[in-house]
Amino acid sequence: MKVAFVGKGGSGKTTLSALFCRSLALQTQPVMAFDADINQHLGLTLGLSSADAALIPPLGLEMDRIKDYLRGQNPRIRSTASMVKTTPPGQGSRLLRVTEDNPIYHYFSCQVNDIRLMVTGPLSQEDLGLKCYHSKVGAVELILNHLLDEPGEYVVVDMTAGADSFASGMFTKFDLTFVVVEPTLKSLSVYQQYQHYARDYQVPIAVIGNKIVTEDDLTFLRQQVGDALIGWITQSEYVRSLERGVFLPLHHLEAPNLETLRSMQHAVDRCEKDWEQFYQHTIAFHRKNAHAWANAATGEDLTEQIDPDYQFTDHLPRQAFPVS
């Protein structure tokens, strides 16, 4: 399953992403995590030192390496330069699997507490004033376009703050999106934006309350989001210690908060994966980007990269069916 964590800046989505990944990994579930936030803190929250986190090669700085591998022998992709973040796989493309080893994982990933972590990286000095952060996040989108996850495998993406992911097709890549919400109107505005933008794309959304102190906090969230609220994290001494760099075993997390992590996993596992919808969304956003900017940027008609005879579902394991 592919899972996203979004929320207002400071809502705690990176902390929740890390706790969720660690909870899965303790059950020996295969977990792949991406730090796709401009503030690159997921590695630290998973338990890496600052020095080790700084050694992970950023995906966003070496897009050509990713494109060269994924392009494979696909004749519809004429060059690395003509491959963009929305390019779908076709005949001859290389697909990725969560538990395999391949040159992309070997070069870009780091193992931390049984979690495979990759990072987009921050904006470089050369990017300032020239590029937005979506140029970095495009590396994750391209990988997700080519990634086959099987039952019992989890791909977790800590997204950019706010509703920025709607500037691309990234928001359609996930089987479930967790919106982390504090009991404030400002924090709730991100959930409301997600709900509004995603409603035409059948994107499943669940709300996790964070920094819950009183029963009034819960009442407020229930009034605002209703049944979308599936769990909450109370004011936590464990999390406060984690934010100060004190990394304790997960069983030290407060019992109600551990129960919320279990509820989150249960919500993900209940989702019905629709691979055909996933691929059709990929094609639709590729057409949209091609017409909006990519054709002009590359000097090619990139809609020709869409292979009408390619059946994405032919590459799925039998246990990945049925689709919804």
Image (cartoon, grey):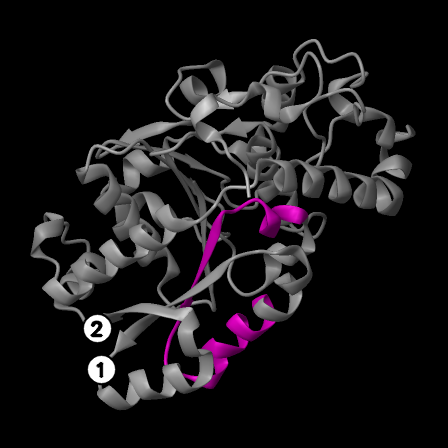
Rendered location of residue 244, percent (x, y): 19, 60
Q: Quadrant of residue 291?
A: top right
Q: How many marks?
A: 2
Residue where numbered disc 2 is placed: 234
- At mark 1, the secondary structure is loop
Magenta region, residue range:
169-194
Residue 181: in magenta span: yes
Residue visible at 86% across and 47% down in the picture: 292
Q: Is residue 217 above or below residue 238?
A: below
Q: Are marks 2 and 1 in contact (CB under 8 Å)?
A: yes
The quadrant where residue 156 appears: top left
Going from N to C along the chain, the mark reached first, 2 or 1, is: 1
At label 1, the amino acid type is Val
Q: Secondary structure at mark 2?
A: strand
Indicate whether 80 appears above or below 217.
above
- Of residues 110 and 157, the one nearer the viewer is 157
User: Measured from the top left, where is residue 301 in percent x and y?
Assistant: 91, 30
Name the image quarter holding the C terminus: top right
- Magenta includes 29? no
Judged left or right of residue 41, residue 313 is right
Give the CA distance from mark 2 to mark 1: 6 Å
**In the picture shown, does residue 62 fall above or below 237?**
above
Q: Is residue 159 above or below residue 153?
A: below
The disc placed on residue 213 is 1
Quadrant location of the N terminus?
top left
Mark 2: amino acid: Thr
Considering depth in this image, is 262 or 245 the residue closer to the camera?
Answer: 262
Q: Residues within 10 Å of mark 2 (few under 14, many from 20)?
A: some
Q: Position of residue 129 (x, y in %)?
A: 70, 53
